[in-house]
Image (spheres, rainbow, N blue to C red):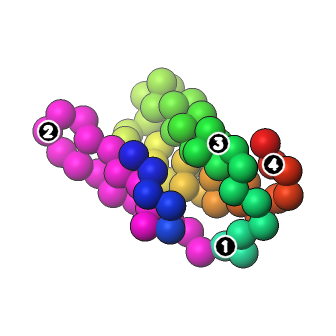
């Protein structure tokens, strides 16, 4: 679950994993949720741990906020 500037969380049925949002200068948020879930899933399906996939997704989606028309 993404929570904007409060970061993101994932639950595997037993444990909740949290990832802080990264501080960036936001230009455009269009498509950021898509960037997050796409980058999370691309790592997770390659057997990355949930914390690792969350971290990658936070980094990727934070970067996408800094580009106008990133979608």
For disc 4, the marked residue is 70
**Residue most toward the left?**
14
Q: Secondary structure at mark 2?
A: loop
Residue 8 pos. (x, y %): 41, 55
Residue 62 pos. (x, y %): 64, 60
For marks 2 and 4 on the same chain, the one whose residue lies earlier in the sequence: 2
For disc 1, the marked residue is 24
**Mark 1 in CB contact with mark 2 (< 8 angstroms):** no
Front tag of 3 and 2: 3
Report the Cα–Cα distance between label 3 and label 2.
26 Å
Q: Secondary structure at mark 4?
A: loop
Tell me if I can see residue 52 in this picture.
Answer: no
**Mark 3 in CB contact with mark 4 (< 8 angstroms):** yes
Identify the disc placed on residue 14.
2
Q: Nearer the viewer, residue 68 or 15?
A: 68
For marks 3 and 2 on the same chain, the one whose residue lies earlier in the sequence: 2
Residue under the point 44% across and 57% down = 3
Identify the image quadrant of the C terminus. Answer: top right
Magenta residues span 6-23
Residue 7, image quadrant = bottom left
Residue under the point 69% across and 56% down = 29
- Inspect the magenta stretch and tell me whether residue 14 lies in it: yes
Residue 70 pos. (x, y %): 81, 48
For marks 1 and 2 on the same chain, the one whose residue lies earlier in the sequence: 2
**Mark 3 in CB contact with mark 1 (< 8 angstroms):** no
Report the Cα–Cα distance between label 2 and label 4.
35 Å
- Inspect the magenta stretch and tell me whether residue 36 lies in it: no
Is 1 situated above or below 6? above
Report the Cα–Cα distance between label 3 and label 4.
9 Å
Residue under the point 57% across and 30% down = 42
Residue 24, image quadrant = bottom right
For disc 3, the marked residue is 35
């Amino acid at each position: 679950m993404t929570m904007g500037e409060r970061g993101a969380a994932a639950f595997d049925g037993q444990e909740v994993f949290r990832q802080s949002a990264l501080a960036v200068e936001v230009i455009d948020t269009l498509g950021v949720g898509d960037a997050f879930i796409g980058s999370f899933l691309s790592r997770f399906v390659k057997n990355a741990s949930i914390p690792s996939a969350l971290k990658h997704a936070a980094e990727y989606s934070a970067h996408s906020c800094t580009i106008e028309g990133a979608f």
